[in-house]
Each structure stands twice: as C-alpha cells, then as structure tokens.
Image (cartoon, rainbow, N blue to C red):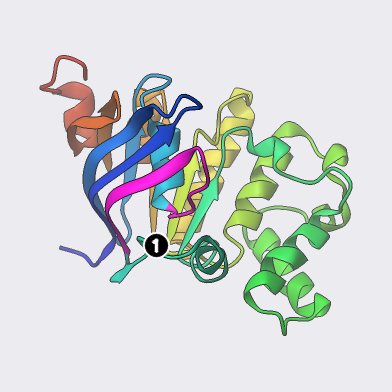
Amino acid sequence: MGNTIIEVRGLTTKYVTRLREDIYAVNDVSFSVEEGRSLGIAGESGCGKSTLALSLMGYYFPPLHYTKGDIIIDGRSISGIKPDDVRKSVLGTEIAYIPQAAMNALNPTRKVIRFIEDVISAHNPKATRKDAYDLARARFETLGLPAETLQKYPVELSGGMKQRTVIAVSTILSPKVLIADEPSSALDVTSQKMVIKMIHDLMELGYIKSMIFITHELPLLYNVTDDIMVMYAGQIVESGSAEQMVFDPLHPYS
C-alpha cells in the first residue's frame, strides 16, 4: 500500500435554487487515491462529475454549498477552510484543476507568461518576473512545449496548444493532486494523444503525485487510469480497477 494522497469521506454538496430548493449534486461520496496512482470518474452528463471536481478543491461559492464530509490531502483536511485561505494555501500547490473547455481559460488580452506570473505571485509574492520566467521556461521545455509560447497571446495558439498550455500553467507549482475534467474533449485525435501524453509525463516526472481524470469515455479511462469509479445521480454506484470496471462490471448501470 502506498501513501494516500487524497482521501474523501462522505462528501455531500448541494446547489440551492432561486426557490430555495436543495439539489444534492454530490451525495455521500467516499474514495481515496494513493501516490503514483490515477483514478477515473465516468458517468453521464449531469450526474455530478464536474461538481465533484469543484467540491474536491474546497472552493465553494453560491449556488454551490458544502454540506458535510471530509477532504484530506496528504494528511491535511481542507474542509471548512475560508475561500481566501483555500486560494492562497491549497489551490495550485495542494490540488490543481483543469476545467472543461480549458481552451477558454486563458485571458485573450494577456500573454501566457503574464498569466503564469499572476499564479506564482499569488503564492510567493517575493518571486520576481525572472524567477517566474525561468520556472515557466524550464517546465514548458521539459513537457515538450516551445519556450516562445510564453510570449504569445492565446489567440496565436492552436486549440491543442492552448489546452497543453493550460495544463502546464495549472501544474506550474507541482500540486499533489491534479483534477482533469474532460481535458481531451473538443480536440482532434492527434491533439488528444498529445494532451494525454503530457498528463502522463507530469506523473512520470513527479510534477504531480496523483490524478483524478473525469470523462464520458470508458475506453479512454481504461488506457489512462489505474482505477475507475462510475457515478450516477450524485452517487458512486461502483468502483474497481480499470480492467475490472471495463471487462467485468457488476452494477447494471456500469
């Protein structure tokens, strides 16, 4: 058994509608991921996958509300921490998130390096522009991205290059856990392959310790992750090894 990097116990979160109705998008979810391993989460649209991803970061804003449960990252509970403290001490360093439509996550009016400077200065105000550039250049080159990408505006990059740039920026501070929410959707097959290879390299090089990968595609999870959970209506209905979940599932929904 390896060191458990992230452990979730009975996590329940809800959306509160304008009519004050409670919609439980994540209902009593529990799981753990060990160092060096990756977990895939599969399920249909609207089952709560992306809400679970947002909830795992402990960064709650209306209409999403925390109800109960524990999120423990490398022995530290992040449940109940104030949003400002979560942003400063958790996001980017403990856990990082690649959102759906990550290609739209970059500010079109700013060069990539300016965006990275903001990320680094938020966690290390003493860091200089040179420090940020040196770190970014080394990381980009290690991951197979041209260093000149740093001086470009998002509009100058292709869709696949934008996606890979967002992944590199999200992991620039070497977070312990990476949550990838359908990072290869809306890309052509060649770009998908490059994105998956980049995420694999992040694990192999030790820039991230564990990964949670969300997608609709079970064949993709089988080739990318060690374990798979199937989610339905806010709950985990079955989990197991990737091979077991693809070739020998037990639950009818799986």
Can residue 147 be seen in the rendering of this structure?
A: no
Can residue 173 be seen in the rendering of this structure?
A: yes
The image quadrant where one finds the N terminus is bottom left
Mark 1 residue element: loop
| Residue of label 1 | 209
Which quarter of the figure has residue 231? Answer: top left
Residue 145: x and y, percent? Answer: 71, 52
Magenta span includes 64? yes
| Residue at screen point 87% across, 47% down | 153
> What residue type is disc 1 on?
Lys
Residue 191: x and y, percent? Answer: 63, 32
Residue 44: x and y, percent? Answer: 37, 19
The image quadrant where one finds the C terminus is top left
Residue 97: x and y, percent? Answer: 52, 49
Q: Is residue 168 left or right of residue 95?
A: right
* Residue 124, placed above or below residue 98: below
Q: Is residue 15 left or right of residue 30?
A: right
Which quarter of the figure has residue 136? Answer: bottom right
Q: Is residue 174 left or right of residue 32?
A: right
| Residue at screen point 80% across, 54% down | 112
Magenta span includes 163? no
The residue nearer to you, when weighing 59 against 1, is 59
Q: Residues within 10 Å of mark 1 (few under 14, many from 20)?
A: many
Q: Is residue 185 left or right of residue 209?
A: right
The residue nearer to you, when weighing 242 against 11, is 11
Region rendered in magenta: 57-72
Q: Single out the residue that lies furthest toward the top.
A: 252
| Residue at screen point 79% across, 81% down | 128
The residue nearer to you, when weighing 204 against 241, is 241
